[in-house]
Image (spheres, rainbow, N blue to C red):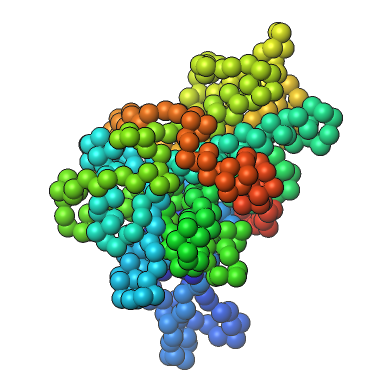
């Protein structure tokens, strides 16, 4: 799996550092005895011309996603990043091949994130449920068998993360191993940064709970496969996400089944890529009929879609409420953030008998992440939070780099506001109110944060070797 020939970086607006030097385009073997000239041809070939008149076309370098060191921050670029095995072209090619497989056809499943759904609805200026119903029709006309909603798997992630935080809190204040603050793990851009820039220091603080994308991968490739009386390798699972970093996440070795040679998520498409696919079909999106929305692995009650509050998954609010209730017997019915000039950094506190017992923070964008990590490294108890919801993108996932970009002349802020309004158009419910996911969690894992749940719904992180010239090697 390589992306050297399929990587497209244009007009970068990078959140970490603006640079296009993310890959070495050609392999050049040095020979001290000969002098040569390198010529770049209009057709893309790079030719080495030696003094004696001989010439040869240089071989393109091949690197995998696991080779990526995030050296230039391209994994959080707000622009197009196409990867051979994680692209619209690969998705379309796989669908065409699957149609010719006869009895060996794979079952094709597409899981759509609520942020991508809102982005598509904003682009076509239609209600979110209507856009989703038309998208289902469009995908199934292409050969997709099932369309699911990652709001369903997000409920698993929230319940697991809340239980994990409560467990850590009790251990720390019981004078055992200190594991606070707990840092959210749903953003792969943040995880990539943590593994490659902070190594073993920061990793123990990061929540082990898988992201909603990867939990959906587990549900589809394990539970759903058994329900269909098939194996994981007979399912082709695609997700539609607001973030290019989700491609890197899906490609992690931790989410690969060595026995069946399959990944939990086979292909990740950004919101913008799914839009390009729809346009490429040549049929106006408004002309598609509205399919019935299957309640299987979809957060829908009656005719109404539902989810949690919060454009990045609602981790801070849900965990705060759960912790207040279970640790201090306090019911928090209304979330009130502390005033801040920075909309991408907010705090929540809970006081009991005049003592501050919970302090949570929301940190979006690299500048705010820098401040959180720096305070953690300084080990100042007065500046230490109990939980931090961290997202690499300013404004969080709703404004992810893979979302549909503003059209020419369109104000990006107005587009973001429209996406937010559509996202919040869905009914808001806590995970406990989702009978379907709660029932599955009881039946499949015997509850929340059990041994089975920890085995299947949690993961681990690894310190990565960092380059001396890494642009991320800044003083935090």
Q: Residue at x 71, y 8 (%)?
A: 353
Kindly indicate the quadrant of the structure image that contains residue 387. top right
The x and y percentages for residue 324 are 64, 21
Q: Is residue 323 left or right of residue 380?
A: left
| Quarter residue 234 falls in | bottom left
Q: Position of residue 404 (x, y in %)?
A: 32, 44
Whether 310 is drawn above or below 153: the answer is above
Near-viewer residue (88 or 373): 88
The residue positioned 34% from the left and 71% from the top of the image is: 98
Residue name at image x 42 percent, y 28 percent: 428
Left-right relation of 180 to 139:
right
Furthest-right residue in view? 175
Quadrant in which the C terminus is drawn: top right
Q: Position of residue 149 (x, y in %)?
A: 40, 45
Residue 2 vs residue 457, the one in the foreground: 457
Residue 121 placement: quadrant:
top left
Any part of residue 411 in sight: yes
């Amino acid at each position: 799996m390589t992306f050297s020939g399929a990587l497209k970086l244009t007009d970068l607006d990078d959140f970490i550092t603006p640079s296009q030097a993310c890959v070495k385009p050609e392999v050049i073997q040095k020979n001290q005895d000969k002098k040569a000239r390198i010529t770049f041809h209009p057709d893309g070939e790079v030719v080495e011309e030696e003094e004696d008149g001989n010439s040869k076309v240089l071989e393109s370098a091949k690197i995998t996603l696991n080779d990526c060191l995030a050296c230039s921050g391209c994994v959080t670029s707000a622009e197009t990043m196409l990867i051979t095995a994680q692209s619209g072209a690969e998705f379309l090619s796989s669908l065409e091949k699957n149609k010719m497989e006869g009895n060996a056809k794979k079952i094709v499943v597409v899981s759509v994130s609520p942020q991508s759904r809102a982005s598509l609805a904003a682009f076509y200026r239609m209600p979110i449920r209507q856009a989703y119903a038309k998208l289902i029709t469009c995908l199934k006309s292409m050969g997709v068998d099932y369309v699911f909603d990652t709001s369903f798997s997000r409920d698993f992630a929230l319940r697991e993360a809340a239980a994990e935080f409560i467990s850590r809190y009790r251990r720390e204040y019981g004078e055992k191993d200190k594991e606070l603050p707990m840092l959210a793990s749903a953003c792969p851009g943040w995880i990539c940064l943590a593994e490659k820039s902070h190594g073993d220091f920061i990793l123990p603080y990061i929540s082990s709970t898988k992201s909603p994308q990867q939990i959906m991968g587990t549900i589809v490739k394990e539970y759903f496969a058994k329900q269909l009386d098939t194996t994981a390798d007979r399912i082709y699972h695609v997700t539609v996400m607001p973030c290019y970093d989700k491609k890197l996440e899906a490609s992690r070795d931790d989410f690969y089944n060595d026995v069946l040679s399959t990944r939990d998520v086979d292909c990740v498409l950004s919101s913008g890529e799914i839009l390009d696919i729809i346009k490429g079909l040549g049929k106006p999106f408004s002309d598609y009929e509205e399919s019935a929305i299957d309640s299987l692995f979809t957060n829908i009650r009656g005719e109404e879609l539902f989810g949690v509050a919060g454009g990045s998954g609602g981790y801070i609010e849900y965990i705060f409420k759960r912790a207040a209730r279970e640790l201090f017997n306090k019911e928090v019915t209304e979330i009130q953030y502390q005033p801040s000039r920075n909309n991408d950094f907010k705090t929540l506190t809970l006081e009991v008998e005049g003592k501050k017992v919970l302090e949570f923070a929301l940190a979006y964008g690299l500048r705010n992440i820098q401040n959180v990590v720096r305070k953690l490294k300084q080990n100042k108890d007065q500046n230490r939070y109990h939980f931090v919801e961290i997202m690499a993108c300013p404004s969080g996932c709703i404004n992810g780099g893979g979302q549909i970009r503003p059209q020419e002349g369109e104000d990006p802020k107005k587009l973001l506001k429209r996406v937010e309004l559509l996202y919040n158009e869905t009914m808001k419910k806590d995970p406990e109110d989702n009978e379907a996911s709660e029932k599955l969690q009881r039946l499949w894992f015997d509850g929340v944060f059990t041994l089975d749940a920890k085995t299947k719904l949690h993961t681990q992180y690894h310190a990565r070797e960092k380059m001396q010239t890494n642009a991320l090697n800044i003083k935090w």
